Image: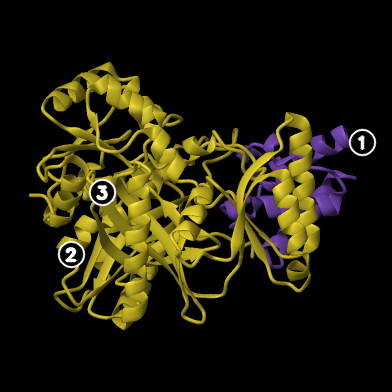
Amino acid sequence: MSTAYLRKLKRALTGSADTPLVLLCNFEAEAQWARHHVGLPVPSGGPRPVVAAMEELGVLLAGADDAILLSRPLDPDYRDYLTRQGLALPTMLVPENSRPDRSTTANVLDSPVLLDRLRQLGAAGAHLLPMGTTSDEEELARRSGLTLATPAAAVVERVNSKIYGRRLTEAAGLRPVPGVCCETRQELAEVLSHHRLRLESGEPLVVKDAYGVSGKGLLVLENPARAAQLLRMVDRRAARTGDDRIHVVVEEWLPKRCDLNYQITIARDGRAELDFVKQALTAQGVHQGHLMPAELSDTQYRQIEHAAGAVAERLSADGYHGVVGVDAIVGADETVYPVLEINARLNMSTYQGGVTELCQPPGTVALARHYPLRLAAPLEFDTVRRALATVSTTRDTERVLVTCFATVAANALLPVGAGGPPEPFDGRLYALLVAADRDRLHDLDRAVQAAVTTLSVVEESHA
Amino acid sequence: MERHEIVENIRAALTEVLMRDFGPLAEGTRLFEDMHLDSTAILELLMALEDNIGIEVDPENLDMDDFRTVGTLTDFLERARKVSS
């Protein structure tokens, strides 16, 4: 049986709560969109295996009538564990020609047997729901006969730009984070020159790529020397390529009480709903997890509701429908900046909607996060399960649920250094924790952290 | 500049960017896994290295593999110095 959350999502995206979906959790979509734009000068490099393995998070969103495309099959013990938790799992579809250096979309496009199966699902009315739609997923929809549940890639790409998001925020009369958009080297130079005094007084600026992939494409400038250095790098690139474009936003670095993430679902007819508001845990711009519900006053919540309506109205007018995650912040003075970034795609928190409906009773609090691991060899799921069984959940409402296991050993797929013994590698264990209140949730989090630490190898510290 | 001096400059740049003191670094030390360098800090690290070593680095000429270890980054900086000089 599907969750009410999933049925609502299906109704908005496809017109019917019963439409079977084929999910594809293509976390690399942002990198695809970024290819058409000029950002900060950063080294090239493909997605890391652990990010690709996060596609498994989609298993918990999909229902029993749905299917999910995965480059690697779900671990059988983890699958049994999820079933024992009472979750109805989707059909897992694994491309017969799967290579770790390719996206799942590319693997599926190279797998005729799976494409035939998808054509059958398409003929039976299934829709394709990618995390983010790029031209690759459009090609997959075309070749498989699946109806795309999202707008065209060009629309999705356009509305995911941070420049688009800033302009929408200003046009809608919402409170923007103080800052500006730049599209050329000259505009960037003028902005940095304008803020020289600010930088000299030690107040930082942050420069963000219009299409910055999480954890990349962000630079904090703390003094005028670094600003000048950035411009020199941009100039050298412009001289080399003959292209002086640079698509970034430059914003003041605001002191904040917390980050927020809220989700809106915009139906094809433009009707929109605020699905939830969560507190986002970040470290240096990189997502760490979500606390739910967020700690907001009634007034602050109403400001978010108002912003959600305004954002949805403009996105709909620009041809977008589907899931939208919006990042926002609450300043140290409790001022709400309701739009820091618009992510017109499925978000990390989107995938939590089903399990929180099933596992988080009203009045309780939950934490969805990942726990870092350092491993010498891949772990069996049962080893993880036994370690977590040592965490005492003292009340009926308390839960610790593993929400993604493939990320634990994904980096074991990396080639090791030539000739030497296998090196320890990093992994992530994703989990959802539920408790009666924040204090108990904090205790549970520490207990899970301690249990996960016992799974890691002990290494000499370099700090 | 000798290779060990480049390694020492990498140590100094990491100290500046990560705001932590480090002892001597082995060339096999991995920047992400062992030093906990974050990808958001890469551009900052390159800027600090430009200052310390006196070369110009075009980040887009680098591949993320160049950041695997202190040794691979040293290899890149040695190549960049030869091009600059």
Residue, disc 2: A359
Residues tagged 3 and 1 counted as in contact (Cβ below 8 A): no
Residue A23 in the image, given as x and y percentages of width and height: 25, 39
Task: Classify residue A120 as left or right of residue A211.
Answer: left
Q: Where on the picture, by quarter, is residue A136?
A: top left
Q: Is residue A294 visible?
A: no
Any mark on residue B85, and which? 1
The answer as to whether the residues below labels 1 and 2 share one chain is: no
Any mark on residue A206, and which? none
Give the colour chain A carries in the figure.
yellow
Any mark on residue A270, and which? 3
Task: Classify residue A124 as left or right of residue A222.
Answer: left
Residue B82 in the image, given as x and y percentages of width and height: 87, 34
The answer as to whether the residues below labels 2 and 3 share one chain is: yes
Residue A77 in the image, given as x and y percentages of width and height: 21, 47
How far apart marks 1 and 2 lie (CA) works out to 63 Å
